[in-house]
Image (spheres, coloured by chain):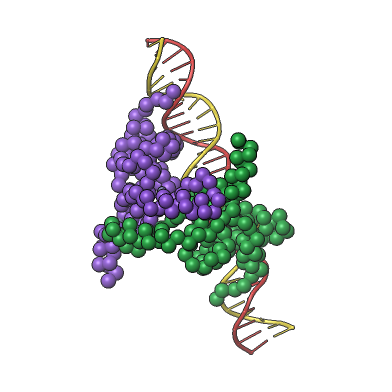
Chain colours: A green, B purple, C yellow, D red
DNA sequence: CCTGTTATTGATAATGATTGTCAAAACCAT
DNA sequence: ATGGTTTTGACAATCATTATCAATAACAGG
């Protein structure tokens, strides 16, 4: 049976309070900084569970680290992520869903899944960085 | 100055002969099996260089491992990958390019890049696995 | 409220990919 | 062929993640 522990709840809350994606290590550090004695392995386990049940979304950073985020949307969706500040926008992409299905079908592929993420600079970061550079 | 060594050439050729994506470790094993005494670190370096110059394409496997492939198309493109046999199809996706740009622009993002990969079972693998399962 | 069963925790070791180190070897213009 | 410079490769180091396993805590039943 699945038991409720303060550790799982702590991870869930910490993830909720986090803007954008965060790594297991970083979330653990954050929790420790807040005085929580939660163990690192437990954070990994909790994040894995949340991702498995769909309560959190995960993706691989370009550096190969797994990043997690508490999703507000329950269904299938994608992300538009600021590579500077981490701000993340959840986006529906019916257009891409259709495209992905068609591409797979056209080539005889079945059971198609896809990875679609857009990275860029959010308006805020664009303004700041442009001011400095220009 | 950039020098030419048999090691770099060996990696390039091994990558060319490989169908689908392959990891640095696997390529190193493959080279060793063929009698090449090339070092592991060198394979990592060569693959990194090839990816940097655009001669090879790289992506992160769901397990976080970096995979490489010799690309036949020079420009920007995406992949349709068989999760069973590794067969890879390069696909152009003007539709998705437009979509990605629009999504970024709609939200005020600039300098948008994107990761778009489709994973599935190729026709061949579908037939084989369906025969076994059904 | 106790209590036993059993899932969960967490310190730590183990794993596995990738990168850093640095002396020795290879490359190439001269 | 020679020398300055780049590249190599064996090995150590790093870093994220997973496995271990005894100790702990959740919770159903009494
Ligand atoms: Zn930003
Ligand atoms: Zn989708
Ligand atoms: Zn296949
Ligand atoms: Zn594209």
Q: Measured from the top left, where is residue B83 in percent x and y?
A: 35, 56
Whether residue D17 sits left or right of residue A37 in the image: it is left
Question: With respect to residue D23, does B13 lie above or below?
Answer: above
Q: Measured from the top left, where is residue D3 in percent x and y?
A: 46, 12
Q: Measured from the top left, where is residue C28 in percent x and y?
A: 38, 19
Question: With respect to residue B125, does A133 lie above or below?
Answer: above
Which residue: 30% across, 47% down?
Answer: B19
Q: Which corner quadrant of the figure contains ligand 3?
A: bottom left
Whether residue B30 sits left or right of residue A2 in the image: it is left
Q: Nearer the viewer, residue A82 or B2?
A: A82
Whether residue A134 sits left or right of residue B28 in the image: it is right
Whether residue B88 sits left or right of residue B115 in the image: it is left
Can residue B47 be seen in this snapshot? no
Count of numbered marks: 0
**Can you say which quadrant of the picture contains the N terminus of chain B?**
top left
Q: Nearer the viewer, residue A72 or B20?
A: A72
Which residue: 51% across, 56% down?
Answer: A79
Q: Nearer the viewer, residue B58 or A3?
A: B58
**Can you say which quadrant of the picture contains the C terminus of chain B?**
bottom left
Q: Nearer the viewer, residue A31 or A86?
A: A86
Can residue A91 be seen in this snapshot? yes
Which residue: 53% across, 66% down?
Answer: A73
Q: Measured from the top left, where is residue A117 in percent x and y?
A: 48, 53
Which residue: 50% across, 47% down?
Answer: B112
């Amino acid at each position: 049976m699945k038991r409720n522990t303060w550790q799982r709840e702590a991870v869930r809350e910490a993830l909720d309070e986090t803007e954008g994606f965060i790594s297991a290590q970083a979330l653990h550090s954050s929790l420790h900084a807040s005085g929580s004695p939660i163990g690192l392995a437990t954070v990994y386990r909790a994040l894995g569970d949340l991702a498995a049940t769909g309560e959190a979304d995960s993706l691989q950073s370009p550096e190969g680290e797994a990043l997690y985020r508490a999703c507000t949307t329950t269904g299938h969706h994608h992300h538009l992520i600021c590579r500077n500040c981490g701000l993340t926008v959840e986006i529906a992409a019916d257009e891409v869903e259709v495209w992905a299905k068609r591409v797979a079908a056209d080539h005889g592929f079945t059971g198609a899944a896809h990875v679609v993420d857009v990275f860029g600079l959010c308006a805020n970061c664009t303004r700041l960085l442009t001011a400095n550079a220009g």
